[in-house]
Each structure stands twice: as C-alpha cells, then as structure tokens.
Amino acid sequence: MSEPNVVAVSGIAKRFAGHVAVADLSLRVPKGAVYGLLGPNGAGKTTTIRMIMNITMPDEGTIELFGDRMGGRHHSARIGYLPEERGLYRKMRVRDMLVFLAEAKGVTRARGAAKADEWLSRLDLAEWGGRKVEELSKGMQQKVQFIGTMLHEPELLILDEPFAGLDPINQQVLKDIIVHLSRSGTTIIFSTHQMDVAEKICDHVCIIAAGTKVLDGALTEVKRVHGGTHVAVAFEDAAAGASAMAAVRDLVATADDSGVSAELTLKSGVEPQQLLELLVGSGARLRRFEHVEPSLNRIFLDKVGAAAAEPSGEVAHE
Amino acid sequence: MSKVWAVIRREFVERVRSKWFLVSTVLGPLFMLAVTILPGALMSRSGRVNQIVLMDEGSGDFSERLKTQLVSSGRFQVQLFPTEAGRAQTVRDSLTDAVRTEEIDGFLSVSPATLETGVAEYQGRNVSSLRDMALLEGALRRSVITERLMRRGVDPGMVQEAQRGIDLRTLRITKRGATGESGMTTFFLGYGVGIILYMIILIYGINVMRSVLEEKQTRIIEVLVSSLRPFQLMLGKVIGVGGVGLFQFAIWTGTGYLVVHFRAQILGALHVSAAQISQLTFPTIGAYLIAVVGAYFLLGYLLYAALFAVVGASVTADSEAQQAQQPVMMLLVFSLIVSFAALNEPAGQLAVVTSMIPFSSPIIMPVRVATSDVPTAQLALSLGISAATVLLVVWLSARVYRIGILMYGKRPNVKELWRWARQS
C-alpha cells in the first residue's frame, strides 16, 4: 500500500438546476497533509467540501474517507468542520454552546467542558465563556466557532475559508494553531483564495476553477512542474524598464510588470541566459536579475487565467 | 442515543432558562382565568341601577305589585306612570324622547290586556343586557300569574307559596357512579381541557418551528447535520421542546391542585366568607382524564410539531414563516371551534366524527372524555388512528425536513415538498 489517503475523491460531479458546480473532480489528501483547496469565487470549493462532509450528495463519483465510503457523518467524530457560512446559537452562553457542539460529536459533557475551557483560555476568551454568543464581536465569534471544530480532537480538520473576516492578528493566531495541529498529526484541508496564506502553510494544494481541477499535488512538485522558468528583474528607472521589456517580448510568456521591476515567466524552452543576453543588449541598466521560484499566486494566475476568474459568486444551494 | 440526548437537553435547558418561559408560566394561567371568568364576571357585574318608567294603561293594582316585584330585584328603580288609554301614544312619544336624552333607561308598558294575553312591551337603551331583561321578564311573569290566580279567588298566601323559586341542581353521573359535579363545573372542565390543549399544542408547535428556522438562519445547521442525522436532530428538538411543554403543564396543574386544595385558606385570607367558599364546587379530575389528556397532548403535539418543523424547514425568513404556518394553524383553530360544539353535545355526530379525525381528535376527544362517557371502543379507535397518523406524518416530515434545512431561497410549493419527501 502506498501512503494512506485520508480523503480520496474520485470523479465527483454536482449540478444545481442546470448549473454545473463541480464536474469530474478527483483529489487525494494524504494523511498528515496541510491541504489547500484553492480557487476563485464560484470555483466549487464549498460544494466539494459539502459533499466530502456528507451534507450534500454528489450526482456522480465516489468519496472515500479514512479508506471507506461510509460518509462524513459516519466518521463525524474524527472530523472537525468549519463551514463557510458561520453560525452559532446567538442566545446561548459560549461555554454551553461549545459543550453542546462537542456532545454532538460524541464527546462526554465533562470532557467537552474541559476542552472548551482549555481552548477558550488559549485563545484569550476565558472570561467570555459565561457570556451569550450575541455579546461577542464578530472576530471572537469566529474564534469560538473555530474552537467548536476542535473540541473532539479530530484527525481531520476541514476549514472552509477559515481566514475570511479575521484581522491580521487573528489570522496569525489561526495559522499558528493550524501549524501546531499539523505537527501533532492532524490532517487539515482548507479552502481559500488567499494564495499568500496558502503558500506559507500548505504542503499540498489543489487548484480548481469552474468546477474542474486545474492542477494538484505537493506544493514543491507543483512549483517545479507548473512554475515554468521565472525571472525577477529590476531596472534603473521605468523608461529603461519599458524599452527592455519591449526588447524581450518574444521570450516571455507572461509578465507581472510593475514598471521598474517585473516578474517574468519565460516561454517553454527559453533559458534565463538568453533573456539576460537580450536585456543587456537592449542597453537598459539592470539593478536585479534573479532566477526565482514562482509564487503560488503567479501559478494560480497563469493557470486559472482570466476566463475562470469571472465573478459568478460562490455556488449556493438553489 | 447520546447525541439525541444532547439535542433534547439543549432545547429543554435553553428554553426553561429563558425569560419567555418564566413569563409564560406565570401569565399563562392568568390569561386562562381571564378568558374563562372575565366575560361572565363582566356580564354579571352589578353596575348601575336601571331607571325605568312603568306606563300603566289602567291595569290598577297590578302595576303597583309589578313595581314592588321589580324594585325588589335590586336592579330597577321604577316610576309608576298611570295613563289614560287615549293619551297612550303621546305619552309613549315623550317617554321615547326621555330615553333618547338619557333621562331614563327605558319604559315598560302594561295594560289590562297584558293580563289576558301576557303581552307587554319594554323599550329602552339597555335591551341587550340579557341579565336585566331576564329579571324584567321574571318579575312580569310572577306578577301576571299572581294577578290571574288572585282574580280567580286564590288566596294570596297560597299564591306566594306556589311561586317559591325552584333550584335545579344538575349532577353528573358517569360509569363510575355519581360525581357530585354540577353541569356547570363539567362544562368548565371540558372548556378548560380544550383551551389548554389548544394553547399548549400551538405554543410549543410554533416553538419547534422557530427553533428549526433559527438553526437555518444562523447557518449552524451545517455543523449540526455534519455531526448528526437530520432525523436525530428533529427528534431531539421535538422531544426537548415537548418536554418544556409537559414541564410547564406540570407546573400549572400542580399549582392548580394546590390552589383548589387550600382554597379555604386562600379565600379566607382574601376575606371571602366560609358560606361562599362552601358554595364553590370544583370538578374532581380523575387519573383517567389526566391519562387521556396526557396521551392526546403527546399525540397532538407530535403531529403538529412535525408539521411546524416542516414549515420551519421550508422557509428562510420569519415573514415567510408567518404565511406558511397559516394552514397548520387553521387546522388547530378549526379543532378548537368544533370543541365548543362538542361541549354542548359530547356524543353528537359532529363530536364523534371529529374525535376520530387525527388533526382534530387531540382536542375534541379529551373534551368529550371530560364532559361525557366515551365508549372505550371509540377511544381506542381514535387513539389508534391518531398514533398511526403521527407515525406517518413524522416520517414524511423528517424526509422533507432533511432536505429543507439545507435549502435557501425561494419557498417551495406543496408539489416540491412532496418531491423532497420522495427523494432518497
């Protein structure tokens, strides 16, 4: 047996009233991975996660969790889930609600209460435990909901857009927790369209657009295979940059041109050396010339392109 | 299942802790008292003494005696106004004016013909006061009968003796023997049973609907259905909310029992005389009736809670819920209205039929049992039909609920609901 997959999705499809949300999507999440499900709005991330969670059923294809097809609800005690649409019982006290969420996962009341207290103090919410949910700020509510996904110490954590709506400080707190959980063996799947965040913490990614997979794999592998040749250049001034860019146009596939600096993706088969020669030949004064690893954002833009980035809105249930 | 138990506990504890529960537990019985006692109390309130004119077209002593009769009722102040037959119309006109300007409340005209035909006429502003008109008619009847008998030479003393009032005491006999309850107490018992069942089924049914809707609106439903089966969630919710209903019902009946049991002390503290207290009769509520009410509360609540859960699951906004709950509410309101007919004729055809129909039986059958002897076969049949319907409706509702809780947007029509129910 090769490395065990916690999640194995094979050829799933989901249609809503004539609209295809997900078409023939397959992916594998290895045990212990921090897996980024990346895509523009409306790509089908949430629909995919909902199908993995057994909330909706795929029209076609199969989903295996922990090696069987019993479904997300069957394994619910091993899975923590943060839906994209956040929601808590507004009138309930924070601690009571966390205990209830733990009980719904099959944890005993005493154990749930102990874990709730532990996490509340860890996230600086200890003094809010006795307050009603509606008295908390939105950021605090998000943290409470995040705690709710972890009380039963799941082996698999599925987070749908966990960073949306958090300030930079809390984004950092969340990132730290994800890294910590990952080190202690938890498999984590999260969706986002923030490539910089994904690049920092994911070791595996899957980019989907318009309901189909664009690419997936280990991050290093993705960068190697799909990154192409990237060169970062900087010039003395914008005028020099403009003339130089014009001179090398034939060698460049795409350019993220910022005037005095640019990140270039070379056409396949073109060596950085050829580019350097042309640039020098153009007479523009260079301040920087570096063969760089492509950013995930760059790959995302290259692969997804303008076509799939059309804002069609996240697919909701209709 | 410990997960269902967690849902039950949450629904129960959060509700019982809320201000709403405290307020409704205290105000509920007060409201009930107001509904049952207030209309009667208001009608029988002594109020103002009626100022009336007794217009007499030559009937002589008769009008004097009638006046005495009327005054002795304590509700009339009477001014006797003898009139010659020829001027009757003129006097009537001026008395009508006096009524219009509110100098007097009305006038009663009697003539010698009254004694023959028994016809008299009262005109006034207060003719809708049933109690006053009954007093007026009673006084008139007694006076006319006395007058007729005396004219035939009967001794006035004997007439008076013959006129002594009667008091029909209605006592209920059931299969278990004489109960000592009056017809009135039985009526109020049935009335109370009907209203309480209606209120408690309605209130807690709507509670289930609101609870379903809240989970949908706050989107917490997604976390829940990834942990529990929708059926477990619905089951826990219905049982938990129903538990609150039973708990509240227990508080009410417990308090009611204590109040009735210690009524002498309570009323004594309120300076009500012992003689008045002894006149109060209370229905004895047997274990049989309590068992029947309890069984139908459970069946009725389960049936309506399942329907209200479907309403909650099929809408997204509160305003939609207001509309969508109407058909379910109509079923309940209809049952309550029919229960009034069942009170009058507990063994009548309407009452028997509606006590078999599962949507009205939870209210009608207990009312029938409270007011009459219902054949055991009828009771068993009604319970059987009801239980079977509850199972079917709960099963169908759970299927619709399962789909509905994750649907947002346009409200589904009945056809779509049916499609959801059949979806695998």
Image (spheres, coloured by chain):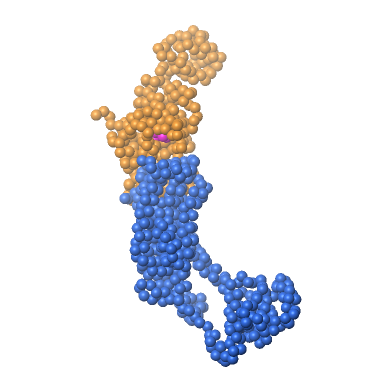
Residue numbers of the magenta segment: A45-49
Q: Which chain is blue?
A: B
Q: Can residue A46 be found in the magenta stretch?
A: yes
Q: Position of residue B64 (x, y in %)?
A: 66, 85
Which residue is nearer to you in this view: B142 or B255? B142
The C terminus of chain B sits in image quarter: top left
Quadrant of residue B47 within the rendered picture: bottom right
The secondary structure that most of the magenta stretch takes on is helix
Which tint was used for chain A? orange
Q: Residue at x 36, y 32 (%)?
A: A60
In the image, taking residue B359 as reference, residue B88 lies left or right, namely right
Vertical comparison of A177 with A98: above or below: above
Q: Residue at x 54, y 68 (%)?
A: B38
In the image, taking residue B107 as reference, residue B271 lies left or right, namely left
Vertical comparison of B374 with A99: above or below: below
Vertical comparison of A180 with A245: above or below: below
Q: Position of residue A146 (x, y in %)?
A: 41, 41
Vertical comparison of B185 with A63: above or below: below
Q: Residue at x 47, y 61 (%)?
A: B338
Q: Position of residue B46 (x, y in %)?
A: 59, 75
Q: Position of residue A204 (x, y in %)?
A: 36, 28
Q: In this rendering, does residue A116 appear at all?
A: no
In the image, taking residue B132 as reference, residue B221 lies left or right, namely left
Q: Residue furthest top?
A: A281
Q: Residue at x 74, y 80 (%)?
A: B86
Q: In this rendering, does residue B101 appear at all?
A: yes
Which residue is nearer to you in this view: B64 or A121? B64
Which residue is nearer to you in this view: A16 or A187? A16
